[in-house]
Amino acid sequence: MSKIVVSGLNFYYRSRQVIYDLDLKVSPNEILAVFGPANSGITSLLRSLNRLSDLNPEARVEGSILLDEKNIYDDDVNVTELRRRVGMVFDMPTPLPMSIFDNIAYGPRLGGMKDKASIEESVETALRMSVLWDEVKDRLNTPAARLSGGQQQRLCIARVLALKPEVIILDRPCSGLDPVSTERIEDSLWQLKEQFTIIIAPHNTQQAGRASDRVAFMLMGSLIEEGPTEEVFANPRDKRTSDYITGRFG
């Protein structure tokens, strides 16, 4: 059974359509990389998966997105709970103006967790899963803003993980990072997929090839091709996919 099923998705900003009749399935515990040139509708797709698009009054969605066979756009869906289940990490790390510890503890506390030992366990677990614990365990009370860019991004991943999501969405999480920080985040993704379903918009085509089980190539709002990463990169079925992967455009 698929974790997410997108059917007939059309996405609009006012009268401008940015996604056209998109169908896509995401399996549990896989890393799906959605890639393509700018203005392909990728961010709009990602934001529709946990209804962050609702925050833009000019956005309109048609079609259905099923999470565990339930349409997330049904009237009875609790959007706050949906966004806990489907957490999102953005391209620019945004640590809260507080300590490393409090950044991670913020979500569990907001959710009603009060026991000190439980909060500490939640923080440590999230930092370990984001491969950051060993680097910060001796300075948890220092401001998160003092962390490097790569560490701040992993902190933001940990902050999502502390909410115990089922799906993690990452929108170009390595776009401003150095190669070492990028490698650490990619390594953490392979560990995280054992417990979570991951959808990533990679910051370049090479990352799509390195850090995913399956890929979906989008162009001008349409899904052109999707399949196992090795298969699509080695033998793309569509010439547009081949041209983009080989750098002929984009």
Image (tube, grey):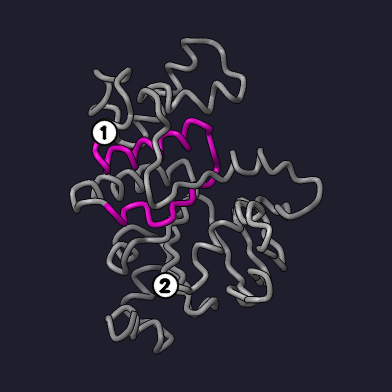
**Residue 9 visible in rendering:** no
What is the quadrant of residue 158 in the picture? Answer: top left
The answer to whether 40 appears left or right of 83 in the picture is left
The numbered disc on residue 117 is none
Q: Hey, what amino acid is under mark 2? A: Ala
- The Cα atoms of the two marked residues, 1 and 2, are separated by 30 Å
The magenta segment:
147-176
- Residue type marked 1: Leu
* Residue 14 spot, x, y in % from top left: 67, 70
x%, y% of residue 245?
32, 78
Q: How many marks?
A: 2
Which residue corresponds to mark 2? 38
Secondary structure of the residue carrying numbered label 2:
loop
- Give the camera-side residue of 160 and 129: 160
> In the rendering, which numbered label is found on residue 147?
1
Above or below: residue 57 compared with residue 63: above
The residue that appears at 50% across and 79% down in the rendered structure is 220
Q: Of callouts 1 and 2, which one flags the residue occurring earlier in the amino acid sequence?
A: 2
Q: Residue at x 72, y 67 (%)?
A: 63
